[in-house]
Image (cartoon, rainbow, N blue to C red):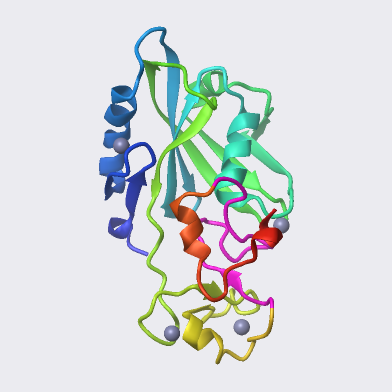
Amino acid sequence: MPANTSMGTCDLCGTTGRKAEMARHVVACAAERDAGAPTEPLLHVRIEAAGAPEYWLHVEARAGATLQQLDALLRAEWLECCGHLSSFRVGRREVSKRTSLLGLAPAKTFDYDYDFGSTTALRGKFIALRDGTPIRPAVRVLARNAPLPWRCAECEAAAVVLCPNCVDVEPSLFCSKHASGHPCNADEIWMPVVNSPRMGVCGYVGPTKRSRSRRADVAGPFAVPEADRA
Ligand SMILES: [Zn+2]
Ligand SMILES: [Zn+2]
Ligand SMILES: [Zn+2]
Ligand SMILES: [Zn+2]
């Protein structure tokens, strides 16, 4: 997918823009929302999917926030299917999750793997440090890529489901109409199209927590029952 289709949305104000524009926007947008003194150092980190930079998050963290807290955010927003192991690395060196974000910042970039079997690999980059009002929770999303415009393999309609049997051999994405004609069609086979680099991998069906607009990503005739997402 061409990089210039990578649009994104600010989680703080709802503004949309291109990826590079959003990197600048969130700095001003977060500062505008500061409540004034007292202030402390806040880190601005960009997370991208390795090999798929159209998936991205801008994250802000208190300097003392740990990699454990960043791991929890990445799982909640993008990754968690069944509690797989994960790790942070700088080069080949694994970094303890007790490390603070400020402690890792001199490395400038880091790698992250979720699930050592069907791995989803991410890359992190420290963008800036600013003084701002302490945030709660200690790690938050500032902005994210807009849902990618996946199309049905059989028509021009938006794809709503993915066939896990066919995910490695096209076509695997379908609108609700063409899903019913797909040879693999059967109860409970379908996985939802979701805004995550882990779409179609293992049992991933979307964010584990919170509601908001991204829930709409999985709405439709093949939506996963609420109870199955707990
Ligand atoms: Zn904004
Ligand atoms: Zn899993
Ligand atoms: Zn279709
Ligand atoms: Zn199939």
What main secondary structure does the magenta stretch of the protein show?
Answer: loop
> What's the residue at 73%, 53% (across, down)?
82
Splitting the image into four quadrants, where does ligand 2 fall? bottom right
> What's the residue at 37%, 54% (across, down)?
146
Is 215 or 70 nearer to us in this picture? 215
> What's the residue at 62%, 37% (across, down)?
71
Residue farthest to the top, as pictured = 38
Instruction: Name which quarter of the figure residue 201 lies in.
Output: bottom right
* Residue 9: % across, % down: 34, 47
Q: Is residue 206 left or right of residue 52?
A: right
Q: Is residue 163 left or right of residue 188?
A: left
* Residue 57: % across, % down: 44, 43
Q: Looking at the rendering, in which quadrant would you find the N terminus?
A: bottom left
Is 118 or 13 nearer to us in this picture? 13
Instruction: Name which quarter of the figure residue 76 lies in.
Output: top right
Residue 76 shows in the view: yes
The range drawn in magenta is: 188-210
Quick check: 23 above or below 30?
Answer: below
Q: Is residue 68 left or right of residue 45?
A: right
Question: Magenta stretch containing residue 200, yes or no?
Answer: yes
> What's the residue at 65%, 54% (across, down)?
119
* Residue 108: % across, % down: 46, 28
Residue 118 shows in the view: no
* Residue 185: % across, % down: 63, 86
Question: Magenta stretch containing residue 81, yes or no?
Answer: no
